[in-house]
Image (cartoon, grey):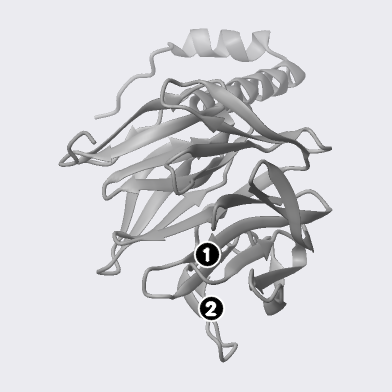
């Protein structure tokens, strides 16, 4: 049986005659534009969603260009704001929410790692030193170009450069002050992590993949097809990955069994992930200028 159109034939003919070919083209273009704007608005406004068994809340709001998160030995939380042209800064956050400026004049501070009695911060924009903040002062450890992600295994400091095809993976010995190049020719390498078993992983955002570093130079492809993987963090639960995409970014967990779980969806420019305890994390969501607190459902309050 043929169903009749909502518009009768005479009415359809009326509209065809009323609209010139140029008018029809303009109408189609306008409808396409409205649809495109609606899709962009959906991407922008759609809230973050958590996987079953997980929840999140806003931990800290109104932190423009929030990027790196870390805690020192005393449990003090450090936060960076990733502005360029010496507009970047580091502040500490007290338990009562009070922010205390610590270091200013930085160019896109994008990495934080505890080191001995202080904290190391990187600078992504241009040629700038990696700085060690301790005893109320900052000390240059070494210089790099577009240094972004950092990690430490307790002995060495590992850093990676976010460059278009000539980035490097570096290892710094704080005792001898020697700097070694572990890998070069990297494309938009942003994240780096050392796991409890000593394995070293890094991202190449430009390729959408994560690799495991091997001393023989034959690095192993671990994950591919990701949406701008930017930050890595490894703990006893597995390898955590945040996607630094403007829209539809995710927080992923590659667990010990090799299963890839999507913990959060619809993030905007996700950055650093900080483990507070098993099943309890913080993540910097730069695209919404805030820090989120994430908990597994069976995680009891600390």
Which label number is shown at residue 136?
none
Residue at label 1? 152
Q: Which residue is mark 2?
A: 213
SS at circle 2:
loop
Q: Is residue 223 above or below residue 44?
A: below
Give how far across and how far down residue 270 sits, in percent: 52, 41
Left/right placement of residue 71 relative to residue 137 reads: left
Q: Position of residue 144 (x, y in %)?
A: 78, 62
Q: Residue 260, image x and y in percent?
A: 33, 60
Q: Earlier in the sequence, mark 1 or mark 2?
A: 1
Where residue 167 appears, as percent x and y from the top left, is 73, 67
Q: Is residue 58 above or below residue 84?
A: above
Image quadrant containing the C terminus: top left
Give the structural element (helix, strand or loop) at label 1: strand
Nearer to us in this view, 292 or 98? 98
Farthest bottom residue? 216
Give the residue drawn at x 17%, y 37%: 300
Label 2 crowd bin: few (<14), some (14–19), many (20+), radius 10 Å: some
Q: Specify whether residue 191 is in view.
A: no
Give the number of marks: 2
Q: How much space separates mark 1 and mark 2, taking CA atoms? A: 15 Å
Q: Quadrant of residue 46?
A: top left
Q: Is residue 77 above or below residue 93?
A: below
Instruction: State the residue lying farthest toward the front.
Output: 135
Give the residue displayed 41% in from the left and 39% down from the top: 282
Tell me if I can see residue 28 in this picture.
Answer: yes
Q: Is residue 112 left or right of residue 241?
A: right
Residue density around tag 1, few if under 14, some if 14–19, many if 20 or more, within 10 Å: some
């Amino acid at each position: 049986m043929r169903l009749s159109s909502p518009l009768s034939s005479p009415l359809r003919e009326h509209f065809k005659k009323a609209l010139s070919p140029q008018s029809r083209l303009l109408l189609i273009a306008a409808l396409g534009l409205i649809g495109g704007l609606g899709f962009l608005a959906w991407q922008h406004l759609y809230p973050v969603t958590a996987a079953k068994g997980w929840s999140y809340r806003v931990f800290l709001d109104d932190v423009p260009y929030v990027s790196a998160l870390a805690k020192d030995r005393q449990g003090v939380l450090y936060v960076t704001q990733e502005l360029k042209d010496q507009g970047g800064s580091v502040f500490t956050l007290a338990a009562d929410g009070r922010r205390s400026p610590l270091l200013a004049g930085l160019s896109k501070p994008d990495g934080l790692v505890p080191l001995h009695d202080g904290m190391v911060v990187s600078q992504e924009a241009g040629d700038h030193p990696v700085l060690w903040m301790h005893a109320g002062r900052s000390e240059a450890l070494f210089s790099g170009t577009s240094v972004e992600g950092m990690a430490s295994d307790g002995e060495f400091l590992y850093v990676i450069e976010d460059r278009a095809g000539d980035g490097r993976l570096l290892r710094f010995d704080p005792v001898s002050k020697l700097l070694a190049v572990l890998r070069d020719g990297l494309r938009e390498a942003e994240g780096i992590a050392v796991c409890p078993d000593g394995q070293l992983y890094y991202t190449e955002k430009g390729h959408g993949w994560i690799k495991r570093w091997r001393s023989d130079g034959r690095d192993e492809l671990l994950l591919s097809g990701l949406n701008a993987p930017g930050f890595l963090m490894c703990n006893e639960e597995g390898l955590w990955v945040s996607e630094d995409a403007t829209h539809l970014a995710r927080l992923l967990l590659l667990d010990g069994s090799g299963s890839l779980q999507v913990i959060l969806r619809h993030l905007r420019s996700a950055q650093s992930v900080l483990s507070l305890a098993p099943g309890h994390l913080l993540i910097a969501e730069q695209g919404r200028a805030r820090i989120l607190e994430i908990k597994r459902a069976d995680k009891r309050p600390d």
